[in-house]
Amino acid sequence: MSGIILRFCLFCALIGGAFFWFVTQPSFLAKDWVAHSSDADAGALVFAAAGCASCHVAPTAEKSDPPVLSGGRAFVSDFGTFYAPNISSDAALGIGNWTQREFAQALLKGVSPDGAHYYPAFPYTAYARMTSKDIGDLYAYVQTLPASNVDSIAHEISFPFSIRRSVGG
């Protein structure tokens, strides 16, 4: 009898795991999403309206024009401390190697180029209604800003909130 119970529990665990995996999978842009020709000057307006500098310019950095998006600003929450990442045009430590589609994926869906969920500390839901033209313009503008070789600070989040996959649920 205990063998039947054990198999039933194992079966339920497998079904529960598969359900969790399905429910928490990242949502990606539609296959027909296309990049737009971009206007960096219009992107500067989108950048200002979206408030990108308020999070991504380091709090210790002096005001510079143009801004350096090296990140580092801390956001303390009940779940832990989140840090704004480097979104400068640096190819290794920023988003300089991202495509416009990957940039749009982050803004609209809250998903990184490698398919990981971003924590909702990044207000991607606030950008969900941006047009593809706005995204293209913003992408073009960000790419004109200075690169920063400052590495992003890892979030300080306790278990189970440290499991990014659970953000999808």
Image (cartoon, helix red, strand yellow):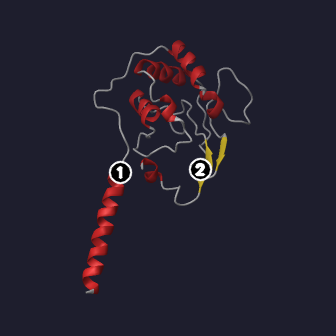
Q: State the SS at label 1.
A: helix
Camera sees residue 164: yes
> Total marks drawn?
2
Q: Residue at position x 57%, y 17% from top?
A: 44
From the viewer's perspective, tell me whether residue 102 is left or right of residue 87. left
Camera sees residue 95: no
Please determine whether, in this image, residue 106 is positioned above or below residue 130.
Answer: below
Horizontal and vertical percent position of residue 91: 50, 34
Q: State the SS at label 2.
A: loop
Horizontal and vertical percent position of residue 32: 28, 27
User: Disc 2 marks which amino acid?
Assistant: His
Give the label on residue 36, or none: none
Horizontal and vertical percent position of residue 165: 43, 52
Q: Residue at position x 54%, y 29% from top?
A: 89
Q: Earlier in the sequence, mark 2 or mark 1?
A: 1
User: Disc 1 marks which amino acid?
Assistant: Val
**Residue linked to disc 2:** 155
Q: Residues within 10 Å of mark 1 (few under 14, many from 20)?
A: few
Residues 72 and 92: in front is: 72
Residues 94 and 163: in front is: 163
User: Where, by quadrant of the figure, is residue 7 drawn?
Assistant: bottom left
**Residue linked to disc 1:** 23
